[in-house]
Amino acid sequence: MRCINVLIADRFPVVVQGLRKVLGAQHNFKIVACCSDGISCVEAIRSLRPDIAILDISMPGLTGLEILGIVNSEGFSTRVVFFTASVEDRELVMSAAAYGIILKDATPEFLVKCLQQVADGQRLLPRPSSDQLSPEQIAVTENALTVLTDREHEIMCLVSGGLSNKEIGRRLNISDGTIKVHLHHIYQKLEISNRTELAALAMSQTEISSPPRKIKFPDNKADISDIPTQRRGKGEGLHRP
């Protein structure tokens, strides 16, 4: 198993230390840099080219979204994952081409599983907690498996894994137009309007069900259960282990 180089950037030292402890215990993860502000984070990404950058959305110097924009515009292969306490900005982050969001209340096991999926090229969507869903959404989620056909359920699972329509079509050997028709039917049945809501509902099943139900992905894919301020001097805030 190849070694996955990871950069951690968060304004809170306790978060950085916690992530270092969790990932340091994994034999296939290597922490190449820890940063406390956006400027040093960009410098580290440019010089070290990590496989994954775990970013706080709000940091001094440059925000996480600004760092993501730089990474994308300069063509780095680094995959950006946001580590946050809130899912309020999930649609903004996902539309900005991040590989996903991991909530700060995630278990260490879930965190490691998510990062491994990102390293394997899979995009993530944030998993909402049950207290962030309305009673109507919870009712719809609990009935989703019985409302959808087997094919619709397959597509729902693949959408929650971050696959595009073309990728889903190749996986299931059906056309892009057929995928769109299936998604239209799914949206109608679940009374939702976009794939972000669909993915959130799919992943929330493991949290609001009792006992928890894991969403199985076709073809043995892994499941998913569980502003600029004053600039600092060059290199300040960067700590290499």
Image: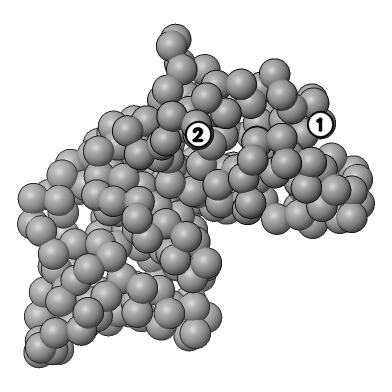
Residue drawn at the location 41% of the way across and 36% of the way down: 133
**Direction top: furthest residue:** 211
Residue drawn at the location 79% of the way across and 25% of the way down: 150
Pointer 2: what residue? 137
132 w.r.t. 39: above or below: above
Pointer 1: what residue? 151
Residue drawn at the location 31% of the way across and 45% of the way down: 103
Between residue 13 and residue 182, name the one nearer to us. 182
Residue 169 visible to an observer of this rendering: no
Amino acid found under the numbered disc labelled 1: Arg
Colouring:
one colour
**Which class describes the residues within 10 Å of circle 1: few (<14), some (14-19), or many (20+)?**
few
Q: Is residue 191 left or right of residue 18?
A: right
Residue 212 visible to an observer of this rendering: yes
Q: In the rendered image, which quarter contains the C terminus?
A: bottom left
Q: Secondary structure at mark 1?
A: helix
Q: Specify the quadrant of the image occupied by residue 211.
A: top left
Q: Specify the quadrant of the image occupied by residue 199.
A: top right
Q: Specify the quadrant of the image occupied by residue 104.
A: top left
8 w.r.t. 126: above or below: below
Earlier sequence position, callout 1 versus callout 2 = 2
Q: Is residue 120 left or right of residue 182?
A: left
Q: Secondary structure at mark 2?
A: helix
Q: Mark 1 to mark 2: distance in Å?
A: 22 Å
